[in-house]
Amino acid sequence: MRNVDMRTELGELILRNPVVTSSGTYGFGEEYAPYCPVSILGGITVKGITPLPRLGNPVPRLAETPSGLLNSVGLENPGLVEFRNSYLPKLALLDTAVIVNISGFSPDDYTLLASSFQKKDTGIAALEVNISCPNIKHGGMAFGTNPRSAEEVIEAVKKNTDLPVIAKLSPNVTDIVEMAKAVESGGADIISLINTLLGMSIDIQTQKPLLANKMGGLSGPAVRPVAVRMVYQVYEAVGLPIVGMGGISTWQDAVEFMLAGASAVSIGTVNFVNPLAPVDILNGIEEYCLKKGYRSVREIVGLAHE
Ligand SMILES: Cc1cc2nc3c(=O)[nH]c(=O)nc-3n(C[C@H](O)[C@H](O)[C@H](O)COP(=O)(O)O)c2cc1C
């Protein structure tokens, strides 16, 4: 029996604990199953789904940087129909909350995607709306860097699904609070942040960009202080529950995000290094609460604020 109540509340979305995995770093759950039983986790977030299948960007599309990873995968995914027919039935059998991440190129795409996922699809806990992908030319981040478009997209999603809607914000903006307020006005139930930071690496021997797509999204420990700052700012300005992510590699990192105001934490790039990281992080958070005398993990959310 666990000593600390690890359940976390994100509005109507209740997770058995605050540790989930991040979209694009955990496939569709199957790849990690031999290493990390998903039933231990609060939830998993699947790779971003678009209306049509996508092969993604040309390779090379991954490059390591100091304490980070640049990727320009470009939303490789099987597309909506294949996802619903072949992946969703298997995901529905998993003993964990499944968050479906959706991505579009127009408001109509988001409407179509949202209307395709409802509560009656047993197994889906929430929809995460990616308005922040830096790796596709049109759409994605274009919606996530303009408050008006972000609000419209979230409004369209909200109107067309009865699932809790998580708006995933881009850090590639001057004012994250403005974006958070925009998605709140659009009806978002939960905010997740951050997606990757637009970056670039150049090979000094070939004298050309390392990524075929030239630019990519930076993730991993290098982005963590930016993410913590944004979670802190959004917590102060907006009343919605927050899923914090960006460079979380240890339980100490996760606790930092929760103190900043995240009710749940999402584990991304570190999975590529240590597939058991989410379990280590979960155990570490529980141990921290125990040592500090908290009976519920919910008590530490936002403690860094005045
Ligand atoms: C290879 C890769 C693919 C990703 N694909 C998606 C995606 O499809 N949709 C999405 O919303 N975020 C995607 N992300 C962003 C992550 O979900 C996460 O927001 C970001 O990597 C920051 O967390 P981290 O530093 O812990 O990885 C991807 C990240 C990586 C590294």
Image: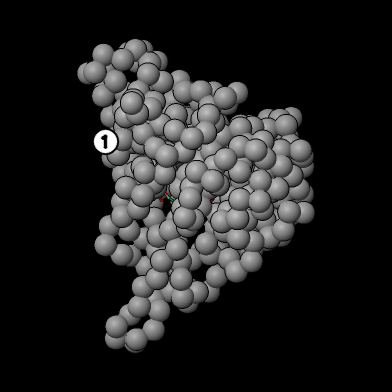
Name the residue: 49% across, 56% down. 173
Q: Which quarter of the image is occupied by the N terminus?
A: top left
Quarter of the image where one finds residue 132: bottom right
State the residue position of label 1: 252
Name the residue: 34% across, 12% down. 295
> In the displayed image of the protein, which residue is found farthest to the left?
291
Above or below 58: residue 273: above
> In the displayed image of the protein, which residue is found farthest to the bottom?
206
Name the residue: 54% across, 23% down. 14
Element type where label 1 sits in the image: helix
- Residue 190: image location, x then y, percent: 56, 34
Above or below 294: residue 204: below
- Residue 184: image location, x then y, percent: 61, 37
Q: In this rendering, does residue 32 appear at all?
A: no
Give the colour scheme shown.
Answer: one colour
- Residue 94: image location, x then y, percent: 56, 33
Name the residue: 45% across, 66% down. 216
- Residue 77: image location, x then y, percent: 61, 57
Q: In this rendering, does residue 11 appear at all?
A: yes
Left or right of 256 on screen, residue 188:
right
Question: Is the shortest distance between ligand 1 and the CB of mark 1 under 8 Å?
Answer: no
